[in-house]
Amino acid sequence: MGQMIPEPAPKLSMEARLNGLSKMSQTSSNFTERVIAATGPNAHPRLKEIIPSLVRHLHDFAREVKLTVGEWEAAVEFLNECGKMSNDRRNETQLLCDILGLESLVDDITSKLLASSASETPSAILGPFYRHNAPLLPNGSSIIQDLDPSVPWYTQAVADSAHVTGRVLSSSGEPIKGAIVDVWHAAPNGLYEQQDEAQPDMNFRGRFMTDAEGRYSFYALRPVSYPIPDDGPSGRLLKLLDRHPYRPGHIHFIVSAPGFRTLTTQLYDDRDHYVTNDAVFAVKDELIVKFVPKEGDPKALWLLEYDFVLGRK
Ligand code: BEZ
Ligand code: FE
């Protein structure tokens, strides 16, 4: 009977309690709390918020999947490889975030934090192929350069020729005059001009300024799906996960105007097979658009009309 009643626990000194803690198993949640508690009182305020949460999620993740040393070493090597492959022309670590949906997620979190009205056009990720200083072109001109029958994708370009037009509006519906609509898309071979020596500099890129009615207008092509760069570690991971590297056909936009928050977004052609299966998870329903047949325009067989709504700063 005496054996069944435990002796009262002796009072422990502070030193003994700390010793006990340090002998605790690293797989216990106390271990995680100790790592979090190592943050000092003068830590950067935002890091003080972010890092404890990161530590908690990382530790829980490692416990959940029973991560081994070998697997962790492989992951470290993988991240190192992404870093070594990155430079000012290619960002493999960002690409890794893209295929894990992280860039799209933080883009959405950020735009929702900043949005003041539900009518604002949703944002989408910038992607790695933006170039500053695309030519500023008059409304109604074309972003397609040097298209002639010698270009390998000439026939497809003619079949996909499109007039893209619409207005830039405030969230209360007023037209915004003098807004800049910066636009870029890939060629029918799925390559942006900087990926393809055969294309002229700044092909399929242009900037347009809205008129007094807030209207922009340009000629382009219906965009095609293309694979994201998959010759590096991110591409290897896609293959190991039995995933494809394709993005649905899209046109990129950055719309800016004084006094308004700059909108970075993309419009997705609804004909595209990958519109419901984007390798980087950037598609939002409101950004899926319909090109309709255009008649009587020698420059375009298709028309896309789309209004962008900007939020005030
Ligand atoms: C793009 O849309 O250009 C893009 C986005 C993420 C990764 C690769 C390409
Ligand atoms: Fe793109």
Image: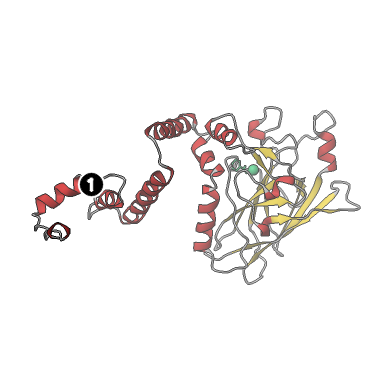
Left or right: residue 22 compared with residue 284: left
Q: Position of residue 172 (x, y in %)?
A: 63, 72
Q: Nearer the viewer, residue 45 or 2?
A: 2
Residue 229 % position (x, y)? 60, 34
Q: Quadrant of the N terminus?
A: bottom left
Question: How many C-alpha atoms fall within 10 Å of the one at disc 1: few (<14), some, or many (≥20)?
Answer: few
Q: Is residue 268 above or below residue 312?
A: above
* Residue drawn 50% across the image and 34% down it: 88
From this view, report whether residue 86 is shown above or below residue 24: above
What residue lies at 60% left-to-right and 40% top-to-bottom? Answer: 129
x, y percent for residue 94: 51, 41
Which structural element holds mark 1?
A: loop
Q: Is residue 239 left or right of residue 37?
A: right
Q: Please state the total of marks drawn on the protein image.
A: 1
Which residue in the rendered view is the most extreme toward the bottom?
A: 172
- In the image, farthest residue toward the right: 296
Amino acid residing under circle 1: Met
Q: Please say if 173 is above or below 256.
A: below
Report whether 189 appears left or right of 179.
right
Q: Nearer the viewer, residue 240 or 163?
A: 240
Judging by the rendered image, the residue that carries numbered circle 1 is: 24
Q: Nearer the viewer, residue 250 or 241?
A: 241
